[in-house]
Amino acid sequence: MENQAQSSDNAVNDATKELFERIQAGDSELVRQLIGSSDVSVNCVDEHGMTPLQNAAFKGNLPLCELLLAHGADVNANHHENGYTTLMFGALSGNTEVTRLMLQAGAKTSPTNSVGRTASQMAAFVGQHACVSIMNNFFNREQLDYYTITRGFEKEPKLPPNLAPSLHKMILMHNLNPVRLVQYLKNNENLLNEACKIANVLELISEKEMKSKATNDVLAVKMHYLSNVIRQCHKWNMEKTNGVDEFIKFLLRARENDGTRVNMEKLLREIIREFPFHESELFVQIVRNLTDVKIGDEPTALGILTQAVNGARSLEVVNPCSTCGEAKASKKCSACKQVNYCDAVCQKLEWFTHKKQCKRIAEEHKERQEFIQKENVRHKLEEEKKKLEEEKTRLEEEEKRLEEEQKEAQKETITNGTEDKEDSPSPPKDSGTTESKTIEETTQKLEDTTVS
Ligand SMILES: [Zn+2]
Ligand SMILES: [Zn+2]
């Protein structure tokens, strides 16, 4: 390996040693200080030939990985004794965000380790399937740059080179909510201005993925979908003033009685149906999942599409924004407190239609809370009733036992004659009556325990 000499030099440095210890401990502040000092190289290696980034990736520590990359860590540095790459370490950690970050930082997917396995094969081997899915669905920048070069008799490339970075970013977006995609287009006007070219390139990529030897219909479906969202957005932009905002409104408009976004559902179903490669198994599966689902019922077309592209667990999003679907939306509607938003912008976008739902949502929430409370009370009463019933059974058994004892005693008295009468064991005189009284009381209590 070319950097072997440099690696052993680095390994002896005290500051370097401390850096690796701090990464192990996950102490980002000290790591930040250390990599800021001149004694430490961000691409140094430990005794196994692992870089700081590889250590952080193996730990599945996303903030540390981001920090190291921001300080110039080389994602493709490879001095490891067994040829493990940073991407392999990230995937082995099982952290999907770390895996994605490495890919976005330009990690190569093809290198193999000393046992001849790629990162994806290693991850599959240890059962990190979410990471496998991310690696297999990743779209390389080079695959896109292919279209930025003039080919054959072309006067200009299919994709203007200056658009490649922002288009690539859009392709990698995990959130397929059309509102989020349109917001992205709105913020990247250069993409919107060349919407037709971009949409065409995406359809070409989709076709290529379907016709290549190693068919990738996940990418093909995603590209087809993105292409069509861009086309629709362009259409609105051309036909109306403030067309992009109007398109967002169109997508968000909810049916008054149940909040269903009918326009969005219909549009997404239409886009899915237009996927031209009907032999694709994924396409068949998506269509099968959509058939017989009435508009307004679950799953939605967006849900089915997201699962098909991003994997089975992709719908488990924490506090999604009601407008754009981004995760961890921290603001809430102040009136109903039931829907989340990224920020004031997202809330403002949805308000025109949410205001018709807000009261109903709040009432439904209140009803739900009351129902839960009622259920809790009912549950408590049931428990009490069960306990009393058990107590009743116990007392009845006790009474039976005493009766039998009494009978036994009488029998003995009869067989033994009168002389033994005084010595014969006899039950306490009023014990029977006490027991029956307690049973009566228990039964009474049981009847009082009304179950609502
Ligand atoms: Zn949002
Ligand atoms: Zn509300």
Image (cartoon, rainbow, N blue to C red):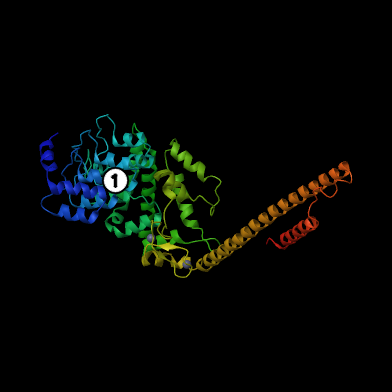
Kindly tell me whether mark 1's CB lies below 8 Å from ligand 1: no
Expressed as whole percent of the image width and height from the top left, the position of residue 292 reads 56, 46
Identity of the residue drawn at 55% across and 51% down: 294
Identity of the residue drawn at 48% across and 53% down: 265
In the picture as drawn, the residue positioned furthest to the front comes out as: 419
Task: Say what amino acid the circle numbered 1 marks.
Answer: Lys
Residue 241 appears in view: no
Q: Which image quadrant shows ligand 1?
A: bottom left
Q: Would you say 2 lies left or right of 345 here? A: left
Identity of the residue drawn at 29% across and 45% down: 59
Front residue of this view, candidates 102 and 232: 102
Expressed as whole percent of the image width and height from the top left, the position of residue 191 reads 29, 54
Q: Would you say 36 lies left or right of 234 here? A: left
In the picture as drawn, the residue positioned furthest to the top comes out as: 115
Identity of the residue drawn at 26% across and 51% down: 26
Are there few (<14), some (14-19), or many (20+) residues within 10 Å of tag 1?
many
Residue 265 appears in view: yes
Image height of 211 relative to 19, above or below? above
Front residue of this view, candidates 182 and 28: 28
Image height of 371 relative to 225, above or below? below
In the rendered picture of this protein, how many numbered marks are placed on residues? 1
Expressed as whole percent of the image width and height from the top left, the position of residue 392 reads 72, 54
- Per the image, label 1 sits on a secondary structure element best described as loop
Image height of 275 relative to 260, above or below? above
Q: Would you say 178 lies left or right of 162 here? A: right
Front residue of this view, candidates 442 and 438: 438
Name the quadrant of the N terminus: top left
Name the quadrant of the C terminus: bottom right
Mark 1, residue position: 59
Expressed as whole percent of the image width and height from the top left, the position of residue 8 reads 12, 38
